[in-house]
Amino acid sequence: MALRAVSRKKTVRPRRRISRPASRPSKPAASARSGWKGVILEYWDYLPIRDRSAVVTLHEGHTPLIRSVDIVRQFPEGVEIYFKFEGTNPTGSFKDRGMTVAISRAKEEGAKAVICASTGNTSAAAAAYAGRAGMCAYVLIPEGNVALGKLCQAMMHGAKVLQIRGTFDRALELVRQIAKEHPVTIVNSINPYRLEGQKTAAFEIVDTLGRAPTYHALPVGNAGNIVAYYRGYRQYLKLGKARSAPVMLGFQAEGAAPIVRGHPVENPQSVASAIRIGNPANWQEALKTRDESRGLIDAVTDTEILAAYRLLAEREGVFCEPASAASVAGILKLAARRMFKRGDSIVCTLTGCGLKDPDSALSQASRPAVIPADLREVAAHMGFA
Ligand code: F0G
């Protein structure tokens, strides 16, 4: 580098336009210039941000709607199933849709710090977007109950991570109190801007399918996402962009199913750590959503969740986290009760990426065999002996 700099100084030539080879376009291709801009700019008219310079985005959204090729075989002929795979968002979960709006709004309002309680994904998204916005992020998580990948994300994005000896529900209580007494903005789903952002997933589904599905299934934890989706579908219906809104199907984990039981669960348990929540903040709104859409909120066991988790990875090629698989476990349970019929379409939200939770994956799959580096051995282990 140094040598080249010196030689360039010696030969001072007038600046000349460098002509590019004909094969290389001088401007970026149209597709690159008009790439996906993130949910706020793409759905500008439907979201509560007014100052373009305040937009904090990682180009979240625009996630794939993947048609089922295998699980669909367990349903009657003529049923269509799609997976809205939110694991392809920048921090690997649907939380990014809400976080871009919550953090942009906090920036508009001049906030310097944000706080959240989290089972992991909210903390990862809050840390990433707050970092990008130059804000401080504080996250309170239940000690020992957050998947490894999510903890790594929050740490790497520079959040101040506090592990409490208590549940997610206790962490959220503490967050509410802290925000009353100190200058920090809550970015949990009790922040109304979060749900505004999350509703854009429903917009994308209608934009892709050209209509709303008959049913929409998703996991329920703090119960914000089910409310957000229905809000999005209803808004598109009102605008005439869809002719119907789906029946909403929510699924909690059996050991963490306060809405199904009708009372808070003190010590929620499930292999699906993301939805290990005993007292959801959006409980009443979720009930309203269930009733207005003529849907249901049911529970699925850990065994059912893990079976769907493996099926999705092995047969559909989609590696999601255990909590995400609750949506598929739920519709499989309802299919066994003959709920669906020809002509129905079902969208399942797969809320987060499987790589976030390596421990759950390792506990499900058999470990690879270790063998000598020998041709015959390899062939023999492949069954070609
Ligand atoms: N799936 C995943 C992967 C989640 O992380 C969550 C919630 C849910 C489903 C449930 O969504 O709360 O809107 O009903 N995770 C929150 C968190 C609680 O802190 O990351 P919900």
Image (cartoon, rainbow, N blue to C red):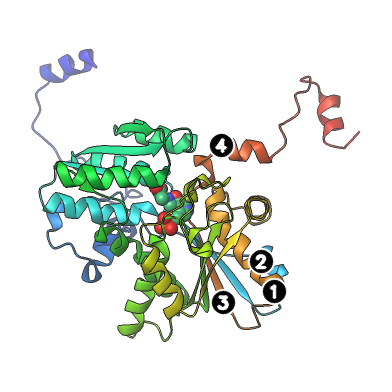
Q: Disc 1 marks which residue? A: 337
Cα distance, mark 3 to mark 2?
16 Å
Q: CA distance from mark 1 to mark 3?
A: 17 Å
Depth check: give the residue in front, 173 or 199. 173
The one nearer the camera, 4 or 111, is 111
Indicate the secondary structure of the residue bearing disc 3. strand
In the rendered image, residue 118, in percent from the top left (x then y), is placed at: 38, 44
User: What amino acid type should be assigned to the residue bearing mark 2?
Assistant: Lys
Residue at image position (91%, 33%) is 385
For the residues labelled 4 and 1, the Cα–Cα distance comes to 33 Å
Is mark 2 in CB contact (under 8 Å) with mark 1?
yes
The amino acid type of the residue labelled 4 equals Pro
Residue shown at 42% from the left, 65% from the top? 226
Q: Earlier in the sequence, mark 4 or mark 1?
A: 1
Which amino acid type is marked by label 3?
Ser
Residue 358 image label: 4
Label pair 3/4, CB-CB below 8 angstroms: no
Q: Which residue is mark 2?
A: 333
Front of the two marks 1 and 3: 1
Distance of label 2 from label 1 (alpha carbons)? 7 Å
Label 3 neighbourhood size at 10 Å, few (<14), some (14-19), many (20+)? some
| Crowding near the residue tagged with mark 2, few <14, some 14–19, many ≥20 C-alpha atoms within 10 Å | some
Q: Specify whether 320 is left or right of 368.
A: left
* Residue 330: quadrant of the picture: bottom right
Label 3 and label 4: CA atoms lie apart by 32 Å
The residue pinned by badge 3 equals: 345
